[in-house]
Amino acid sequence: MIDERISTTPIAIRLATPADIEQIDHLDSFSASPTRSIHREVEKYFGSVDPSTHEYTLIFLAEIAGNVCGKAELMLPPTEAPQQIGYVRRVIVHPDYRGRGISKPLMRYLIGYAHEERHLTAIDLLVWENNVPAIQLYEELGFSLQHRELYYRLHL
């Protein structure tokens, strides 16, 4: 059951500042990604995105009544890159706020910012195949499947 007080309260979206680090780390602890336990500095080099293709990352936060309840990161390409393609990662909504429509306005804001402020020509993202709610959201926002990746492991 959705708390009507929360569902009717406006969602504010803003860029994160260094003062938000503790809240960002707290949200990251709720990630469903299998790579969530990899320290952020290590992930920069061993994540699914080549860090040399992106200049820096912006973090967008969603708040309800002053409480940070969600986040999404937008990796920006260098300004001299031939293709201005951003990359979205770490879209996370706090478990207490899931199912309440936080991700959609957060992603719409991020997409608008990427297009209008940064003049990106496309945005890529990776989503796990079993994350059906996220896939539905991304498709509803206009993302289309580009390819599937297979992940293999040899147990020794």
Image: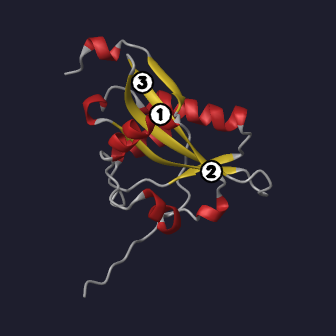
Task: Find disc 3 in the rendering and name its residue.
Answer: 63
Is the residue 154 above or below the residue 67 in the image? below
Between 146 and 120, the residue placed more toward the observer is: 120
Task: Find disc 1 in the rendering and name its residue.
Answer: 19
Could you tell me how far apart the alpha carbons at marks 3 and 2 are, in whole angstroms? 23 Å
Instruction: Tell me the residue at 60%/36% (across/down).
Output: 111
Could you tell me how far apart the alpha carbons at marks 2 and 1 are, in whole angstroms? 18 Å
Q: Secondary structure at mark 2?
A: strand
**Does label 1 or label 3 sit earlier along the sequence?**
1
Which quadrant: the N terminus?
top left
Name the residue type under label 2. Answer: Tyr
Name the residue type under label 3. Answer: Glu
Name the residue type under label 1. Answer: Ala
Left or right: 40 in relation to 84: left
**Does label 3 or label 2 sit earlier along the sequence?**
2
Which quadrant: the C terminus?
bottom left
Could you tell me how far apart the alpha carbons at marks 1 and 3 are, in whole angstroms? 15 Å
Q: Secondary structure at mark 3?
A: strand
Between 10 and 23, the residue placed more toward the observer is: 23
Mark 2 closeness class: few <14, some 14–19, many ≥20 residues within 10 Å: few
Instruction: Tell me the residue at 49%/27% (across/down).
Output: 105
Residue 143, given in percent of the width and then of the height, sits at 55, 45
Task: Find disc 2 in the rendering and name its residue.
Answer: 56
